[in-house]
Amino acid sequence: MAQTKTITQAVERLGYRVTVGDVAAEAGMPLMEAQQGVLALASEVQAHLQVAESGEIAYVFPKNIQAILWSKSWRLRWQAAWEKVWRVLFYLIRISFGILLILSLVLIVVAIAVIAIAASSAGRDDNDRGGGGGGMIFLPRIWLGPDIFWLFDPRSDRRRPPRTKSEMNFLEAVFSFLFGDGDPNADLSDRRWQSIAQVIQASGGAVVAEQITPFLDDLGKGWDRDLEDFMVPVLSRFNGVPQVSPQGGIAYQFPELQVTANERRRLRPPQFLREIPRRFSQASSGQIMAAAGLGGVNLIGALVLGSLLQDQTLVYQLGGIVALANSLYWVLLGYGSAFLGIPLVRYFWVQRQNQRIEARNADREQRAAALDQLTPDQREKLAFAETLTGQTVLGTDNLAYTTESDLTDQEIEQKDKLDAEWQRLLEQRRQGS
């Protein structure tokens, strides 16, 4: 299912007329998988085949591929519906952490307030009976979190800062503060193979290993690197063939990537594969501070509540929300600790990952820069590779067969072409004589 979606998107980007090599290069997938996928998709949507006189095949797909597939496959309809449902469910999951934080904080504050009021009332009763000064729990008016009480400010000159369209709300920011926003390099493998295919196509279908190394990671050591074993996966993926020059240098030719259905403007491939550094959170600095502040208040409140709940007799007498807070106390304390502990651990993990990403990027960039300082042997290999380059464009004027029209009509058309060519040769002969 995922392969069908990938191939469909590649066909749409390529303009609905493609070869197998076009799809493999655009999607960055192995040629064998691309061939099987293109054939399966062509059969499903009844695409047309165009066979050139040289034997190469181009596939012409209808421009309403998605509609045809949806009308035939209940799986695709179910998948599309599930993706919509999952987006809603995942959004609810994301905001649930912020809601739990607020509910936890409210429960803790209310429980502390109820216990404080009860203790204060008991103190006043003791004072009335004893006539002396008793103790009273004093709750200072200190707020360690962000200023969220501006809504209740009667002054009209205080306004909430404008919120941009792309800014996430606070509940989404809480999830981002806790768990981040996903791996920015989740598509790294796809980008790697797409870039390699672009380099091969931009080079005319023949390259040397030094042109590919800026897109690879581990090149091996010793003989493995000297013998260019790292090129084996590239050859396997795109059906490449190693060619040896008279001087013993090795170039790599990819015949199927030299055939294209349309002569398109060649995109300039990237110089090297660049990994995107991870971000701790895409939330604004104010939202991160607000989430951390509320988390800190929640943890401190949980610790204060724990000390007040030591008197279980008072908890039993008060009941209600105090009893609820007592039963959930370890959950509240655990959530408050994890709310600050997880981002702290993740922060140092992100820093370590970014150091590794920076090192890999620098290594690949150095390999790309080395292409400007090739040794004589490497220049000889590159010159030999240029002799293997070429591109075959399957136009519509040299087709031997197409399923878009009847076979009889095609035979008549071919006969007319031969007769016209014969008449042209006879006319040239008469003029020459």
Image: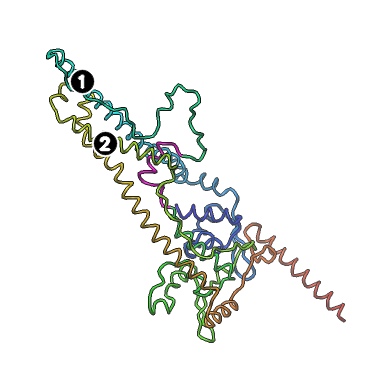
Which kind of residue does numbered mark 2 sit on?
Answer: Ile
Asked whether 1 falls inside the magenta stretch, the response is: no
As drawn, the label of residue 120 is 1
Regarding mark 2 in the picture, which secondary structure is present there? helix
**What's drawn in magenta, residue-wise?**
168-183
Which quarter of the figure is the C terminus placed in?
Answer: bottom right
- Relative placement, left or right, of 203 versus 365 is right
Q: Earlier in the sequence, mark 1 or mark 2?
A: 1
Asked whether 170 falls inside the magenta stretch, the response is: yes
The residue at which mark 2 appears reads as 300
Spot occupied by residue 179 in the image (x, y as percentages of width and height): 36, 46
Tell which of 403 and 83 is nearer to you: 83
Spot occupied by residue 56 in the image (x, y as percentages of width and height): 59, 68
Q: Is the residue marked by circle 1 packed among few (<14), some (14-19), or many (20+) residues within 10 Å?
A: some
Give the vertical position of 337 relative to 152 (above or below).
Answer: below
Where on the picture, by quarter, is residue 432? bottom right
Tell which of 311 and 124 is nearer to you: 124
As drawn, the label of residue 432 is none
Which kind of residue does numbered mark 1 sit on?
Answer: Ser
State if disc 2 and disc 1 touch (CB < 8 Å).
Answer: no
Regarding mark 1 in the picture, which secondary structure is present there? helix
Give the vertical position of 294 relative to 351 (above or below).
Answer: above
Alpha carbon distance from label 1 to label 2: 21 Å
- Relative placement, left or right, of 432 versus 144 is right
Is label 1 or label 2 in front?
1
- Relative placement, left or right, of 313 versus 265 is left
